[in-house]
Image: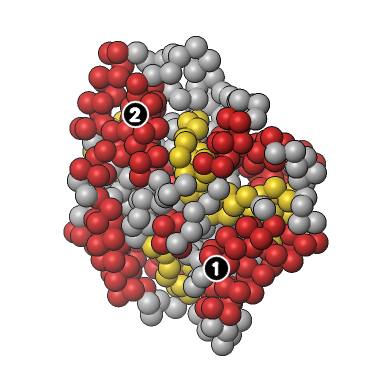
Amino acid sequence: MTRLLHRQIHAPLPVAVSGRGLEIFDRDGRSYLDASGGAAVSCLGHGHPAVLQALHAQLDRIAYAHTGFFTTEAAERLGERLVADAPDGLDHAYLVSGGSEAIEAALKMARQYFVEKGETRRRHVIARRQSYHGNTLGALAAGGNEWRRRQFAPLLIQTHHIDPCFAYRFRHPGESDEAYAERAAGALERRILELGGDEVIAFVAETVVGATAGAVPPVADYFRRVREICDRYGVLLILDEVMCGMGRTGTLHACEQEGIVPDLLTIAKGLGGGYQPIGAVLLGSHVFAAFRDGSGYFQHGHTYMGHPMAAAAALAVQETIRAERLLERVVRGGGHLMNRLKERFAQHPHVGDLRGRGLFLGMELVEDRESKAPFEPALRIHARIKAEAMAQGLMVYPMGGTIDGLRGDHLLLAPPFIATDAQLDEVVDRLGRAVDQATRAARTQS
Ligand code: PLP
């Protein structure tokens, strides 16, 4: 009996009572190895002493001060840290309470930027199919997952979608990475021209696609081309690194590996590592300057933005990542995990692709490896794997609709950066059993 409207009404949940390192413990004494950081959130695992200490200290000073009246040391220090570590050209931070709020703010910043500059005709947002930017209405409108959008479509602002850069599914046989990158980025230019070069506000994309497609990195110079196209038409580039950012791919920001800097960069999950709800938009200096030299404010705001407890947690998380040199660990641990996944699954009849970067890895499940044919959606392979994994005491993050919102199954692995090689080996062992059992049961049924 519960008085909460949970995500699923008919699926009772275990009650989590404590967490330590990679493990979460439930009320019945079962433990779960957290190989997905929830949804790529818990980058430091659970109960990290440095973050707990920072939270206690902040609570003793002040828990909340409204940003319409005060700033706080915690928020200011976090702003300093974020800008010091940001790619060149991003020089201010706007603090919110999560990923969807960060995307909403970025979309409005992009529009207001052009209003400040007198380019009021600009109104179109272009994004990509098979991307996820959050569940609030603006973020949902930017997202390209058909299933999530369908019933809310009448409420969504108009947006425009192009195909993602998704080599396993969209690169033609025999096409080189370079040729595919050119074709995929070319779709953006064509859409900008269709809409009118001076009427587009922004292009929104996840640097490495997370939840909807399963850790899909871009190929070759796709994002360099995207950056050039945006610059050619004065369109702002919003990179959504809510899931793939803050170290998850081995560099603090995933776009560092693409050699480009966006105009607006959204971050969230790994920013606070789950210790507090927090997200942020990092602003290019030209965007900030347009507000500063124009109306003098950004017309937006939330009651909990810049929350001192959230800022203190995020600062402690980010300082711990630096102090413990955890980005190096992400690269090494990610390499180890990928090798173990390849050993276990490269020949698996139902694993079509293993992909990703750092400790942000994806596995795509197929009915047939040769033709890449997906399982029947009704078999809900992704849900079976999640259930089998939980029964093994393992948390992974599976999802269906990988190809087009309906067909295809994948799972995400996003373990905490502190995971040891031995823990990652255990993840692969348990996952192997879960995938074998789920696919065997589905084959029997089909
Ligand atoms: N953007 C991306 C890329 C995400 O993966 C998510 C959440 O999964 C969001 C935005 C929305 O973040 P939140 O759930 O914190 O609102």
- In front here: 263 or 74? 263
Amino acid on which the number 1 mark rests in the picture: Tyr
Quarter that holds the C terminus: bottom right
Where is residue 108, by image quadrant?
A: top right
**Going 74% across and 66% down the picture, which residue do you hit?**
190
Could you tell me residue 115's position as x and y percent? 72, 36
Question: Which disc, if any, is residue 91?
Answer: none
**Going 64% across and 41% down the picture, which residue do you hit?**
110
- In front here: 401 or 429? 401
User: Would you place residue 176 above or below residue 101 in this image?
Assistant: below
> Which residue bears the numbered disc 2?
77
Mark 1 vs ligand 1: CB under 8 Å?
no
Could you tell me residue 285's position as x and y percent? 52, 41
Q: Could one spot residue 62 in this view of the protein?
A: yes
Instruction: Look at the numbered disc 2 and give the secondary structure of its residue.
Output: helix
| Badge 2 density bin: few <14, some 14–19, many ≥20, Cα 10 Å | few
Whichever of callouts 1 and 2 sits on the residue coming sooner in the sequence is: 2
**Going 61% across and 31% down the picture, which residue do you hit?**
293
- In front here: 251 or 37? 251
Extreme residue toward the bottom, this view: 174
Could you tell me residue 207's position as x and y percent? 50, 57
Amino acid on which the number 2 mark rests in the picture: Arg
Q: Could one spot residue 385 in this view of the protein?
A: no
| Label 1–label 2 contact, CB within 8 A | no
**Going 20% across and 60% down the picture, which residue do you hit?**
421
Instruction: Look at the numbered disc 1 and give the secondary structure of its residue.
Output: helix
> Which residue bears the numbered disc 1?
222
